[in-house]
Amino acid sequence: MANLGTLFIIGCFASFCSCEAGPFVSLKQGNLVGRYFTTRKGRIVSGFSGIPYAEPPIGELRFKPSVPLNQWSGTLNATQPHAVCPQFNYYDKGNENPIAGSEDCLFLNVYTPQVPKDKWNNLSYPVLFYIHGGSLSVGSARYDWLGPELLLDKDLVLVTVNYRLGALGFLSTGDGSIPANNGLKDQVLALRWVKDSIARFGGDPQKVTICGNSAGAGSVHYLTLSPMTKGLINSAIIQSGAAIPQASAIPRNESIRYAQQFGDKLNCASGTSEDLLKCLQDRDLYDIVKQQLTFSTWDPTTGPFLPTIEKNCADAFLCRNPFKLMQSTNILDIPIMVGMVSNEGMIVSAALSTEELDKMEETFQTLAFHDFNLESLALADSLRKFYFGNQTIGLKTRPEITDLYTDGWFLSGVDYLIQNHLAHRKQPIYLYYFDYMGSESYGSLYSDTSFICGPSHTDELLYLMSRNVAFPRYKPTPSDDEMTETMTSLWFNFVRYGNPTPAYESEMRHWQRVVSNNLEYYHIKGPRKLSMRSYLLSSRRYFWRNMGINVDKFDV
């Protein structure tokens, strides 16, 4: 069972020390000393936690693009958990303070099998750059939230990164006063840091795979579309999320409107965009994060602070419609591995109380209109008919609610991404469908543990990253351990070779790239139940294809 009471602990801050012997690295910003970790198989690896990659985004830097950190003095103590970025204390229900974190939070962590002993050392491990999920409003890269103990049994360097969340990362006035996409620009700055510094940790700056889960996967997809990442990444792994019109973007005019409404709530309404910026920079951090909750619907972690198109293309992360960019040849053409879990929608269905289910029944049209960014209320009626027929929405229809959100938030995005990749790019794309139910599940975090109908959203991460805070009593079964070996091998192969089952890999079933609209996919049912299949959830997939989402509205 997950530990809800400690999931959102506020981290320690970066500090400086006269440290005992530990792994040591010298960078142009200064020296740092880390600590040793022991992996699942007993391998001793080096870890460096809380490395600042940007100036603290406080004062005049609040709501502005992050700025590279120049230098620090002394030796940085990179052994302790770092701060989380400001966020709602969603899982710690008993905490009197509903807000966690510090604005001084732009840190990354590096884990490596071996630190080069000198500048002539020829170590060159491929790099996995991991971006955490959490609806762009919660989460952290702290090592007790995303640990290296599983992946570092493989010969790769793992980098995990904090980035600004919620309004602090994604509020925008649509102009230069509060530019859009600051949270994504944080990720780009961290990638530039990797390009400049990762060789000092034994990593190969020419072989960087970006990877993320959920909102982190959406971030990864956006990074492949941005001109800012040219020369920084070589391949991408997109786990249970994508840049899609239904849930992961907002038209620029709506972004401006939400910024004005946000200012109203904090008594910063009058004047120009620059006036709004100055006022919000003076507001208390607690009040800023608290006001985000007033924009949420059923889930306090969701809100309208999302990526959007920027007006001025100079120094923009995204100044063209992302959904049209996918249909062009003007973006990176790199190998991609993308996939989903069989019951993604449990992130919604398992969290709904009886009262919330009754409300869904009463207000389904409006709820679906907003949750799936529909063009009309009539489309909400089509959704209801397809998934529920004549049933009344309630406890008995939780499986149908699961399918609805699985498809609208995840399957449709995977399908849209693959369609456009096949049509406009040459590099391979690999699709997986994770369907293994282990002894623990993220479904236990969502609320009602009596409704766990199979593998849930984020369950694949249990076999890639250690989650000591979320699941402190988790004891993997022998089957879970085998699943970890399978998953880390597939991910490592892709990071190293751009192919999850290269020619030398004879122990696992061959994973064929997607080559047609039949959506050939790798069905991961268990560590020894791996098979190639086609026509992934075809009737549900084609239903969403025919929904007719209007991507032109993102040009406004």
Image (tube, helix red, strand yellow):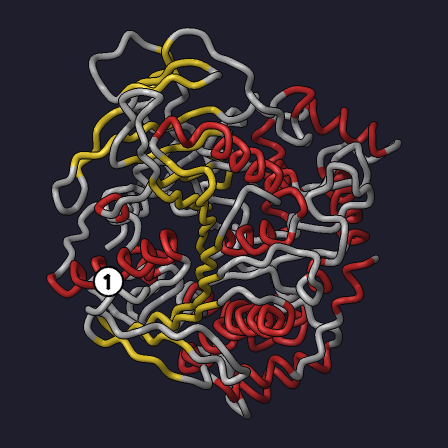
Drawn side of residue 139 relative to residue 246, left or right: left
Q: Residue at x 50, y 78 (%)?
A: 515
Q: Say which of 452 and 177 sits in front.
A: 177
x and y percent of residue 59 in the render?
65, 19
x and y percent of residue 465 in the render?
30, 49
Drawn side of residue 109 relative to residue 47, left or right: right
Q: Quadrant of the N terminus?
A: bottom left
Res 275 quadrant in image: top right
Q: Which residue in the structure is indicated by mark 1?
A: 486
x and y percent of residue 406 in the render?
48, 72
Res 42 quadrant in image: top left
- The type of residue carrying mark 1 is Thr
Q: Residue at x 64, y 54 (%)?
A: 225
Q: Residue at x 69, y 25 (%)?
A: 281
Drawn side of residue 71 relative to residue 433, left or right: right
Residue 336 visible in this rendered orientation of the protein: yes
Residue, far right: 271
